[in-house]
Amino acid sequence: MDVAVDLADAAQVAAMVERCVTAYGRVDALVNVAGIFRAAPILELSLEDYDAVQAVNTRAVFVATQAAGRHMAAARSGAVVTIASNAALLPRVQQGAYCTSKAAVAHLTRCFGLELAQYGIRCNSVLPGAADTPMVQQLRATLRPGDVDETVAGSIEKFRTGIPLGRLAAVEQIANAVLYLLSDQAAHITLHDLVVDGGGSLGV
């Protein structure tokens, strides 16, 4: 079932969850995966762009997880996986809004995990690094020649460590991490951040 919503609209997000429960009778798993990106020097970042990023990347996760969590709590089972980012671990130049949103959402997911554990609900986050996603492809179009290579090899000027494995992640590799955390193989894992970044965050 496809449901199109404006994630910046909390009412639409909550209604989306209820629509899914009505259609399927229950909710066993929730994956918070949507996100937006606004780049700007921190002294030039507009409040409008900052708020837009927080609304989609953080507040929508709160609303969706709370709404789904109520149904999971009633069933006394469920699993939540939030796609955060290794930007939650490391500050990045011109990414103040994005980094803070991902740090907030990773910690928010741990807070949900702590309180929902009593209902048998597990809450974890996947923290990807640079991956070959539509958002990264769109970002590539705005970069100068060589910028993508710097993302992989590292750039002292941009405070990037690079990716030790030497390549961007494939979306399937991120998806497999999510599937693992949703599966019974991860039945005793909760409040965990699974970093999938080719070593880019150096194990921080």
Image (spheres, grey):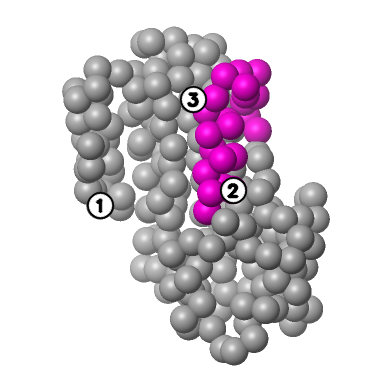
Label disc, if present, on residue 6 of the rendered structure:
1
Residue drawn where x is 46% and y is 14% of the image = 77
Residue drawn where x is 58% and y is 74% of the image = 94
Residue type at the position of mark 3: Ala
What residue is disc 3 on?
Answer: 79
| CA–CA distance in space, label 3 to label 1 | 24 Å
Q: Nearer the viewer, residue 94 or 84?
A: 84
**Which quadrant: the N terminus?**
top left
Q: Which of marks 2 and 3 is in front?
A: 2
Residue 111 position, x and y percent, is 56, 31
Q: Which of 47 and 177 is in front in this view?
A: 177
What residue is disc 2 on?
Answer: 173
Label disc, if present, on residue 180 of the rendered structure:
none
Q: Which SS class for mark 3?
A: strand
**Residue 35 seen in the current view:** yes
Residue 38 sits above or below residue 14 on the image: below
Q: Earlier in the sequence, mark 1 or mark 2?
A: 1
Q: Nearer the viewer, mark 1 or mark 2?
A: 2
Q: Which of marks 3 and 1 is nearer the N terminus?
A: 1
Residue drawn where x is 43% and y is 64% of the image = 134
In the displayed structure, does residue 80 sit left or right of residue 192? Answer: left
Residue 69 sits above or below residue 125 on the image: above
Residue 61 position, x and y percent, is 42, 41
What's the magenta region? 171-192
Magenta-drawn stretch, dominant element (helix, strand or loop): helix
Residue type at the position of mark 1: Asp
Q: Which SS class for mark 1?
A: loop
Residue 151 position, x and y percent, is 67, 73
Residue type at the position of mark 2: Gln
In the displayed structure, does residue 90 sit left or right of residue 203? Answer: left
**Crowd around label 2: few <14 · some 14–19 · many ≥20 (10 Å):** some
